[in-house]
Amino acid sequence: MKQLRVALVMLVIGGLLTTVAFVMAFTTAEVQRFGTVTLSERIDTAFPLQEVTADGYRYERPWFSQKIFYFHVPVAEASFLVFGVAAFFAIRFLMTKRKEYDTKSRIAMETAIVFVTLTMITGILWTRAAWGVWWEWEPRLTTYFIMTLMMIGYFVLRNSIEDEERRAVYASVFGIIAFINAPISFFITRLIPSNHPVVFQSGFATSNLVPFILGQIGMLLVGYAIYSIRMNEERLEERVEIMKEALEG
Amino acid sequence: MAETTARRPGRGLSWRQFRAILRKDIVMELRTKEMITSMGIYALLTMVVYQIALSQAGTAFDPRTIAAGLLWLAFVFTSMLGLNRSLVHEKDQGCLEALLLSPVDRPVIFFAKAIGNMIFLLIVQVLTIPVFAFLFLQGSEYGGQLWMIPVALLGGAVGIAGVGTLLATMSVNTKGKDFVLAVLFIPLMYPLLLACVSATTAAVLGGDGHVQQFWSGMGLIAAYDAIMVLAAYALYEFVLGA
Amino acid sequence: MDPTNEELYRLAITDAPYVLAAYGILWVALMAYVGMVFRRLMRLEREVQVLEESMERRAGE
């Protein structure tokens, strides 16, 4: 029960931090610029006038959809980290054959699939805002799509094996090989020229870094809290099983 | 001195075991011709489906631009069929269990099965390509160097057979069998197929910088094969033990 | 409002629904997931209580 309370506290702190990051992203963070926009009249704006051409006045274009960075990227990075945790516990399981590591690996994978799905959703919305299309076969999107499919595959595999030990071993093996595959597919998809923005390409102002780091910490806390709460549930379930058996026996 | 003499027969033994398992697969195939026939006919049927897909493309469309993709698509599906068959046989006839009971090294089983699967896939590839060229590429010009195609095919077959053998060994022991194999196989194959299609397209189209595109594709194929086959090999022992 | 200013703001405003929707979906989905887990957890908790009571009763008999 103490663990559950800790998880709850972490969930609340994580929620607060990501909310603060969200608010800061729209208030204190410096507006990023992306390309230019040509207007017919000279206007009063904080964005610098680039040049005056025959078409009109060229201003730097404020990049609103970049604001998604402060919660999309933290979720994406957290998802990858949790996936790594799942693979780590899978290795531990194969080394020790202890059931608890398999449970941990499964729960971590479940948390990862939640985060990967959220990354996909926020990513698709961003693609729509920034590029005007809902989907593009672009390295990062594709990699996450493949990751989602592999995680679905992991649970399909689990559900189609009845023998408990075999299920644990096969799932661990697939979890490990899927985790090895994810970065490979990321690098290979980069063969195709991409227009996904590169993070930190030209340095980052402190005013942008603070909300980003807060969001990242918040998301990691939320991730750990979800994992921890699910572990708690798993343990309770086991306890119920044991008690039921004791009552019947 | 004593150590080397003690080791040598061991090594010779695993080589003999390897050959025995591989020979068993090939002899069985020669007798029944089941795998090659089923994979070959499946590949032919895919060609028919391609014809339907391309039927409205018109004459202006250059099929060379997607030829590599179509070929690899055919190979993916036929290889899944073949992998599933090859391990279903082992399981149904209790062959895998017998192998496990015999004092054969587990890595030997992996490599023998993987190379057997690779040989069947290569045979199907060699049979499919002329048919594909005959059906779809008549009158189009071949741009690159001819040796590029077999190199790319071999690179792809190594990865498909290596990872596929691991996945098929797992999937035959599940309730879903071929469905589970597809769900696990296609996402894991994704990077390899992308690189294979890139390299093969460079070979088919030729043109400026195609040699460079081919080699960068081959480099990625080699990296994938090295990492993933090694991982599959390391994990195979656990799968067999379960 | 000045028409050119409007033009500038329009650029930002067209993107806004997607960005805000992304954050909204993110939070609603996370909350829904956590809520679901919690409901299951509470049910299990009650189940454990019931089982514990019946075990105590049996021990008393």
Image (cartoon, coloured by chain):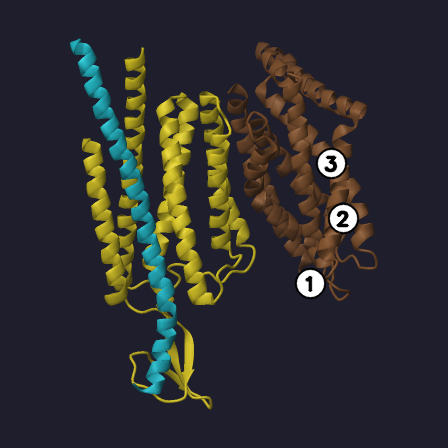
The amino acid sitting under disc 2 is Val
Q: Position of residue C27 (x, y in %)?
A: 30, 52
User: Residue placed at 47% from the left, 66% from the top?
Assistant: A131
User: Residue placed at 61% from the left, 30% from the top?
Assistant: B165
Which subunit holds the residue at mark 1?
B
Q: Which residue is mark 1?
A: B208
Q: Is residue C45 left or right of residue C9?
A: left
User: Residue placed at 75% from the left, 48% from the top?
Assistant: B47
Query: What distance separates the C-alpha of mark 3 from that of mark 1?
Result: 36 Å
Q: Nearer the viewer, mark 3 or mark 1?
A: 3
Figure label count: 3
What is the quadrant of residue B91 in the picture? top right
Q: Are marks 2 and 3 in contact (CB under 8 Å)?
A: no
Q: Colour of chain B?
A: brown
> Which of pointers 2 and 1 lies earlier in the amino acid sequence?
2
Q: Colour of chain A?
A: yellow
Q: Secondary structure at mark 1?
A: loop
Chain in cyan in the render: C
Q: Nearer the viewer, mark 2 or mark 3?
A: 2
Q: Can residue B103 be seen?
A: yes
Q: Which residue is mark 3?
A: B39
